[in-house]
Amino acid sequence: MELRHLRYFVAVADEKNFTRAAERLHIAQPPLSRQVQQLEEELGVLLIEKGSRPLRLTEAGKFFHAHAQELLDKAADLKAMTQRVGKIDRKFAIGFVASTLYGLLPEIVRRFRNRFESVEISFHEMTTMEQLQALKEGRIDVGFGRLKSEDPAIRRIVLREEALIVALPVGHRLAALEGPLKLADLVHETLLVYPKAPRPSFADQVLATFMERNLVPQQVQEVRELQIAIGLVGAGQGIAIVPQSLQGMIRTDVVYRPLDDLKAVSPIIFSTRHMDRSPELVNMLEVIYEIYDELGIAHVKQAL
């Protein structure tokens, strides 16, 4: 049994269709079917129920699928870490959601660069869900995101919880109010949420903040990205719930107001491959906690 057999079977099990799995793997469908059949013959059990439409896994198939995916993730981890150890010129790829650029991420990277000049850093903007896939594929080494997710191949460290605030158009009636705003004050406004895809996303986190308080925004408009949401706020097309650090995005047509709900927060999450304990990751985490300590930001230190 080879890794390609695992990869082929996982694709078929995920897609529940040989044709779509073949397209995903960029191979023809007949050879894929033969490879899966050979795998079943080697194992001596059926993995896929014969004649099922859509395709269904047997109990043995379900068991094999779960463990095959875990082995593929570990193989990807091993490949990425071995490649890193063997390189003289150290490269470090960072995935980030756009909102983190308005917070402390630039200072974190600046200090890291000054301290570890031999490490070549690259940046890749992507959603939290895209970061998880990129980590497993070895395209990035760390992700800074906002969504909590369960994936055995990924280690997640919640760096801190950031307060949510409201972005309003200049001249909006709520902008003139004294003090923090209540979420209940916002349900009659057009709520701009982002990103539209892929889901789940920060949009779902914002909507859940309302739902957990038995509130339902009457009109929700989904947009592709943060910058579009803020641009539409400035144009008077609605309001947006954003992380507090977004106040760093200074615009003459947008004002920001705090919320009176201390539990209305968004986590900043440091994601890595589960087994990765590289010096770059350890050093970056140390820099992050150093900056948090200097600024008096509440956090709980965790080690890799």
Image (cartoon, grey):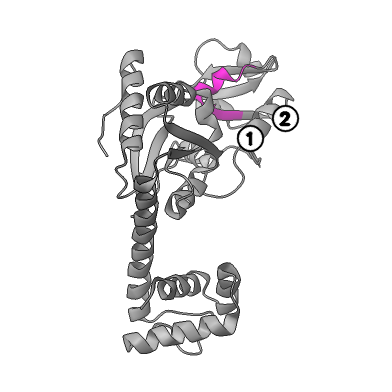
The x, y position of residue 36, in whole percent, is 45, 82
- At horizontal 44% and vertical 49% (from top left) the residue drawn is 135
Q: For the residues labelled 1 and 2, say whether their Cβ atoms are less than 8 Å apart.
A: yes
Q: Which residues are magenta?
A: 240-250
Q: Residue furthest front?
A: 88
Q: Amino acid at mark 2?
A: Gln
Residue 167, picture quadrant: top right
The x, y position of residue 24, in whole percent, is 57, 68
Taking the image as shown, residue 262 lies to the left or right of residue 301, namely: right
Q: Earlier in the sequence, mark 1 or mark 2?
A: 1
The residue to which callout 2 is attached is 237
Q: Amino acid at mark 1?
A: Leu
Tag 2 secondary structure: loop
Up-down relation of residue 303 to residue 201 (above or below): above
- At horizontal 53% and vertical 36% (from top left) the residue drawn is 123
Residue 192, picture quadrant: top right
Mark 1 neighbour class, 10 Å CA radius: few under 14, some 14 to 19, many 20 or more: many
Q: CA distance from mark 1 to mark 2?
A: 8 Å
Up-down relation of residue 16 to residue 228 (above or below): below
The quarter of the picture where the N terminus appears is bottom left
Magenta segment: does it hold 249? yes
- At horizontal 47% and vertical 74% (from top left) the residue drawn is 8
Depth check: give the residue in front, 216 or 139: 139
